[in-house]
Image: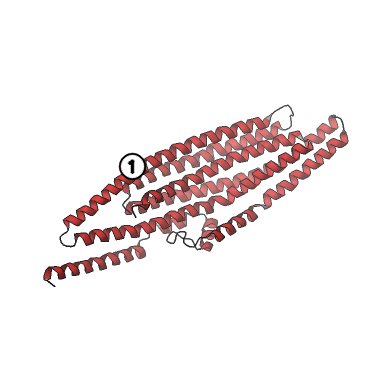
Amino acid sequence: MNIKGSIKILLCFLIGIFLLSAKIAAQQEYDFGQNEIEEALPDEAASELEGLGISPSGGAENLNAENVFEKLWEYICGEAAKPLAMLVSVIGVIILSALIHSMQGEENDVSAAFTAVGTLACSGIICTSFGAAISGAKTAVEGLGTFLSVYVPVFAGIMAANGQTATAAAYNGIITVAVEALCQLFTLIILPLASCVMGISVAGSFDPDLRINSIAEAVKKLVNWCLALVMTIFTGILSVQSFVGAAADSAAMRAAKFTVSGAVPIVGGAVSDALMTVKSSVGVIKASAGSFGIIASAAVMLPSIISLFLFRLVFVVSSALSDTFGTSRITALLKSGESVMSIVIAMMISFWALGIVSTALMLVIGGGNI
């Protein structure tokens, strides 16, 4: 073997040792901010993920369908107590009101007074349950907002280290603005609006001539249209900029690989291959962090969303039963409550979907370059 060949083999060996030691040192000493991601999670969600063995470094490798359905059932059982108590209480008031109304026969001052008392009792039950549900929803949105404010820059940094600098810049800028905007929208507009509609519905339920459920239904449609428009705008901008950025990142990576291959004498090809190997290692970290972000978002939001869905189901069942028994005022109140719950649920799902869709989009766009 000539001297040139021996030098080439020696340089390849030394470069391989250097890159391997650099990769090990990076994994041991620098975690790309993954500890900060875990610390940003609410305590309850963090303990749930720890129990499932899910972490930013491992991603979803310990997750399976059995664990998912077991956790969903656990959430449903844990959140079902308050909606079930509300259902029993409201059904009791409905039956009692219908019984008293049937005993009175014709409409008179006494039957009107009993109807008002029944409506008042139902209003108290509904408002108590509504307050608990809204409080849980606000806590979940604030927790997800805090988590995403830390997660998005960290994930964007991992993407940049993976060679997706333009895509990372678009993701970080758009999602940070969207998270802040939706948090403010939920706290300053949606929650006060839902509370106002609920209050108007309770006040209007004492007058049989007022069609209060139409107000709540109109507000629900308006909010759904606005949320659909906002989500379409943010998702469209992110998609366009991400695909453009992905093309620019791919061109830049090919240029860097070509430059290294041609500029470094003798071992340029080996250095170029080693560069792509390191990039692939960072891509594994990105995939783990991305899957963790999606699962962590679900752990933060799912308990509150399930609770709201159960409350909405209670409103639907109760209103159908009330309509059957002919308690029209209580029926109108329950239908308005169902519309208000739909408003809050739509907002929470939109906020949750923004984080999931954006992260999944980044994983899909970068998948071909890993």
Q: Is residue 86 visible?
A: yes
How far from the left and from the top, in percent, is residue 147? 47, 51
Which residue is more in the foreground, 187 or 342? 342
The residue beneath circle 1 is 244
Location of the N terminus by quadrant is: bottom left
User: Secondary structure beneath disc 1?
Assistant: helix
Q: Is residue 32 visible?
A: no
Query: Which residue is most to the bottom?
Result: 1
Which residue is more in the foreground, 130 or 269? 269
Identified at 31% across, 45% down, the residue is 247
How far from the left and from the top, in percent, is residue 298? 52, 52
Number of numbered tags placed on the structure image: 1
Q: Is residue 68 left or right of 212 when viewed as pictured?
A: left
Q: Is residue 216 above or below residue 350?
A: above
How far from the left and from the top, in percent, is residue 265? 15, 60
Q: Is residue 171 above or below residue 52?
A: above
